[in-house]
Amino acid sequence: MLDATFPKVTVDGLAVRLTGNQILKDISLTVDPHEFVCIIGTSGGGKTTLLRAVAGLLPASSGCVRLDGEEIVAPTPRIAMVFQQFGLFPWKTVRANVEYGLRVQRRTDESGRVDRLLEIMNLAQVAGRYPHQLSGGMKQRVGIARALSVEPELLLLDEPFSAVDAITRELLQNEVLQLWERNTQMTGMLITHDIDEAILMADRIVVIAGPPGQVAMQVPVPIPRPRTPRGVRTHECYPELRDQLWAALRDRATHDLERT
Amino acid sequence: MTAATTQPPGTGQRPRRFRRPARSINTPLTPAIRWALRLTSVLVIVVAWEIYGRAINPVLLSSPSAISRAFVDMIGDGTLFQALAESLVVLGAGSLIGIAIGLLVGLAAGRNQVFGTLIEVPLNALYATPSVALIPIIVVWFGFGPTAKTVVVILFVLFPVLINTMRGVQEVDRELVEVARSFCSGERRMWFDLIIPSALPYMVTGLRLAIGRALIGVIVAEFFTAFSGLGHLIVTNANSFRTDRTFVPILVIAVLGVLLTALLEFAERRVVRWSAKD
């Protein structure tokens, strides 16, 4: 049995260099079991690099990432990722795309999980279609269903709603929020540059400033779940939280603007 | 052709101040009109050929009617079918071997950077050399029999397939490779889920180029080498000034080319269904 306070994810002094550029510098943070952490920062600040390092897709140049205390050196089936540009296979149908993770991990779908996910994500009617026949919002539903199908302990979302229009984005945020609040097993990390999205979804928000990426601030979001977009916006601590985050991001952004 | 420009005299009409806009070049033609135009062009060519061909020495041009008589004759005495069979066997065997080698080497060279770089210079040198230039050497090595012809076809087919396959593998979407890695895909699964499907359109393009070149290869090889096949039929008839009988295998080759290309276009549409328009 794991101690309830033992972190699920530990990022310990992580630094990443890519082709001579320092992308991340000495990042340390932890994510508790079933915690949803949003990582927010200006673009080019190394957020996506951090997520890719957690996924085991990038080697650390120093420090490490641990999952339940075990160092992550390569991708593991315990982690699944949702991609900004969806990352769907254009030659596979919606159903085949959702089944993809189970198939490459040589797992069978005995409990009919794929069917259930297609139903939950409103994809049952389009299961036989190809990705190019879907709208951006539908494509990302496929991406999310694919990640959930492998029942990951840790779900990583890399700006999952940034490539869809504003209305679809709000719908998708709501869907993921509800999925999250019903599921008691997963831990989540979501990358975003949208302050409202971070406040809506997160238990805790980590501000990454860079380059090179460093943790600039961490704030808990004390808004009780289940949440709704309206309930969050009218909560008493919403304005202050928003100002606080905006100030942190604005300082960084103006700093970058002045430098260039 | 229209009467719009030739106004009958004395009608007293004032000239129009503005020209009516011409029918737009971009307006798509209806399928019926397209087919009518295609048929018209063929008919015009055949009729003109017939008229002109009858007027001059038959050794120079011959005519469609004479060619069709020769066609019936050559079917009757079996020369056409024999030559066709000989050419098709070489075409089939050479294409299959060339395509197989091209696909395998192309896949390996696209995925393995060391191997790809290793074969780069000799590959480009051989591809840049007109393959026809190598035929005399091939005859020295393999004699005048069907083996030499097959080797020529292999050589003609190999490069377009190999180079296109290699490029297709190299152009695999990096993000999808990342997706596959994040789901812990093994290398073998990566080939079937990702590399082969994304290289497939390139491979089919390579095949389409290869088919055209294979036809050229077999005919040129038959000019130089074997005493068999459609190419040989063309040379012998031309040498004895039987122009009508020379055109028969030429037209058979033309039909063969059209059929094979159409077949590959059909296959292409089936294979890349996912990228079809919405």
Image (spheres, rainbow, N blue to C red):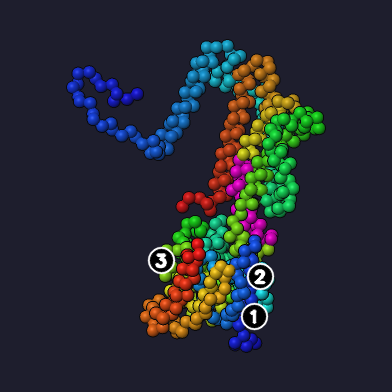
At label 2, counting other C-alpha atoms closer than 10 Å, the crowd grade (few under 14, some 14-19, many 20 or more) is: many
Res. A68 mark: 1
- Residue at (76% x, 28% y) in the render: B136
Q: Amino acid at mark 1?
A: Asp
Q: Residues within 10 Å of mark 3 (few under 14, many from 20)?
A: few
Q: CA distance from mark 2 to mark 1?
A: 18 Å
- Label 3 is placed on what type of residue? Ala
Taking depth in this image into account, of A62 and B17 the one nearest to the observer is A62
Chain hosting mark 2: A
Q: Position of residue B27 (x, y in %)?
A: 38, 39
Query: What kind of residue is marked 2?
Result: Ala
Residue identified by numbered label 3: A166
Looking at the picture, tell me which residue is in the foreground, B118 or B12.
Answer: B118
Reading the chain from its start, which is encountered first: label 2 or label 1? Answer: 2
Please, what secondary structure does the residue beneath circle 3 have? helix
**Residue B58 % position (x, y):** 58, 13
